Amino acid sequence: MKPFLLSMLNGITLAALYFIVASGFTIIFGMMRVVNMAHGSLYLLGAYIGYSVADVSGSWLLALAGAAAGSAVAGLLMHRIFLDRYQGQELRQALITIGLSIVIADLLLASYGGLTYQVNIPDALFGGVRLPLAGGYPIFRLALIGFAILTYVVLWLLIQRTRFGMIIRAAVDDRQMLAATGVNVPLVSTCVFALAAGLVGMAGVIGASALSIAPGDDVHYLLSSLVVVIVGGMGNLKGAAIGALLIGLAEQLGQAYLPTYSAIISFMIMVAVLAYRPYGLFGRPA
């Protein structure tokens, strides 16, 4: 029972991290219809910026803010310079962002080397707590669930209860009609892209605190985000949350009980969902 409960907890906390990463991806890819294959590189960039800020200042909160700001600026420049002119041209966007991801990853490798780093957890969240049946468990991993819930609530309120969110939803349905009403659609798209990039940069610090950060993590989190968004349904926050939970639990339980097949379980879930619900569990036709 104890190993099973620990695997479940690990799956839920990993799902929380996957949701924070994938929530930005579902906004960019699912809502704004921008194919950003550099999403994992923005995660890696945020993690390294957060590590540098924490190393200099000793503050985890400053690291979180610095990573969010740095990744948001990088995302803003990426969208404004390279992607905005190719709106609706998914293949061009995919090729451009793949190239950018390689450049960013190589620059980070040249700057930080091939070592593994970890951001120090703040004192208030350091240590463990005893849970019934499961035994001791890190406080920060439990706090990670709270971060994910807070992210969901803030994004839901932003998208569903604000004028900015109304404009985003209108841009999803009909960009031309929205532009005809006088809204600066390219500026809205750039702001949304920067918001999503800042969110994934913040996730980089959280991930580097809960786990670690190393070259290659960009590919891992890009693939995880793709699977989560495809399973849950593009552009749907609830779908991203359910998809992250399914993938997180599948990975951790697979590593515990089916280690030989753990690497393909997530993709088997994705194939099964696409076979019966081509738009994902909560998706709808574009």
Image (cartoon, rainbow, N blue to C red):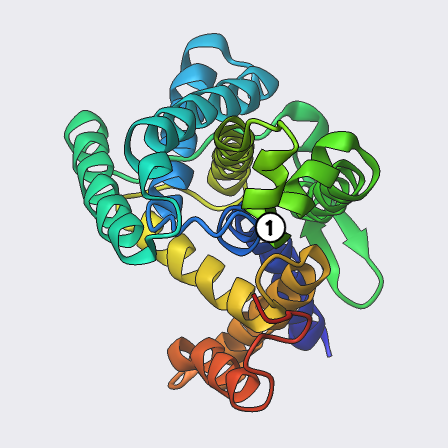
Quadrant of res 38: top left
- Report the number of numbered marks: 1
Q: Is residue 116 left or right of residue 71?
A: left
Residue 182 x/y as whole percent: 62, 27
* Residue under the point 69% across and 32% down: 125
Answer above or below: position of 261 versus 16.
Answer: below
**Residue 20 visible in the displayed image:** no
Q: Quadrant of the N terminus?
A: bottom right
Secondary element at image label 1: loop
Which residue is the extreme one toward the front?
Answer: 180
- Is the C terminus in the top left, top right, bottom left or bottom right quadrant? bottom right
**Residue 119 location, x and y as percent?**
47, 30
Is residue 110 shown above or below 41? above
The percent position of residue 46, horizontal first and vertical second, equals 42, 31
Amino acid found under the numbered disc labelled 1 = Asp
Residue 194, placed above or below residue 170: above
Look at mark 1 in the image and give the residue it sits on: 174
Residue projecting furthest to the top = 57
Label 1 Cα neighbours within 10 Å, binned few <14 / some 14-19 / many ≥20: few
Q: Residue at x 61, y 44 (%)?
A: 177
Whole-percent x, y for residue 162 in the image: 80, 33
Horizontal side, residue 150 vs residue 190: left or right: right
Vertical comparison of 97 with 119: above or below: below
In depth, the one of 43 and 183 nearer the eye is 183
- Viewer-side residue, 150 vs 159: 159
**Residue sitting at x 42%, y 43%:** 212
Can I make out residue 160 in this image? yes
- Which residue is more in the foreground, 79 or 122? 79
Query: Is 28 on the left or on the right of 170, as rendered?
Result: left
